[in-house]
Image (tube, helix red, strand yellow):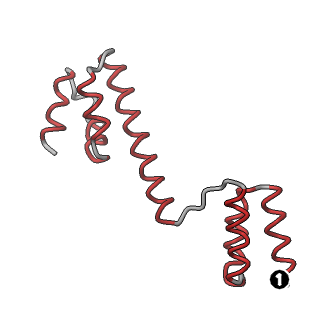
């Protein structure tokens, strides 16, 4: 495919399905000139798309997973104890993934809300 055809593919991808743009870029990455890559990136920026590096995507996914585990732990505790004091909510929000998973894994051994103390004092 010539340069003109590749440019048309990117323009079509942007119009039809913005999500496919990264796939199109990957398909043609070894054949894109620096000018073509700048063209694609500029079009994405103009369309208000956030362009992530692989590292940024990995960090974003990890943060999302940790937030999901945090939400699950809070839901489990609220279901078990009805009311979770603000103190523990803050500790859970500040906890790392390892601590959150320990709490989730041991939810049946936590008999009173104060039992959470050991998970935050051990780390």
Could you tell me which residue is drawn at 74 percent across and 56 percent down? 18
Looking at the picture, tell me which residue is in the foreground, 107 or 74.
74
Quadrant assignment, res 10: bottom right
Could you tell me which residue is drawn at 29 percent across and 38 percent down? 105
Looking at the picture, tell me which residue is in the foreground, 79 or 108.
79
Quadrant assignment, res 36: bottom right
Count how many numbered circles sit on residues in the image.
1
Q: Where residue 4 sits in the image (x, y, percent)? A: 86, 79
Identify the image quadrant of the N terminus: bottom right
Quadrant assignment, res 21: bottom right
| For residue 67, above or below residue 54 | above
Could you tell me which residue is drawn at 81 percent across and 76 percent down? 6
Q: What element carries label 1?
A: helix
| For residue 83, above or below residue 2 | above
The residue wearing badge 1 is 3
Could you tell me which residue is drawn at 68 percent across and 74 percent down? 38
Q: Where residue 41 sits in the image (x, y, percent)? A: 67, 68
Extreme residue in the top direction: 82
| For residue 43, above or below residue 105 | below
Identify the image quadrant of the C terminus: top left
Q: Where residue 52 sits in the image (x, y, percent)? A: 55, 62
């Amino acid at each position: 495919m010539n340069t003109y055809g590749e440019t048309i593919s990117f323009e079509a991808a942007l119009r039809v399905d913005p999500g496919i743009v990264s796939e199109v870029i990957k398909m043609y990455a070894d054949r894109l000139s620096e000018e073509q890559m700048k063209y694609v990136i500029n079009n994405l920026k103009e369309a208000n798309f956030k362009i992530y590096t692989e590292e940024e995507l990995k960090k974003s996914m990890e943060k999302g997973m940790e937030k999901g585990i945090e939400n699950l732990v809070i839901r489990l505790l609220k279901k078990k104890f009805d009311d979770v004091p603000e103190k523990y909510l803050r500790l859970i929000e500040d906890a790392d993934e390892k601590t959150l998973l320990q709490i989730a894994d041991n939810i049946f051994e936590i008999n009173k809300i104060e039992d959470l103390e050991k998970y935050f004092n051990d780390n």
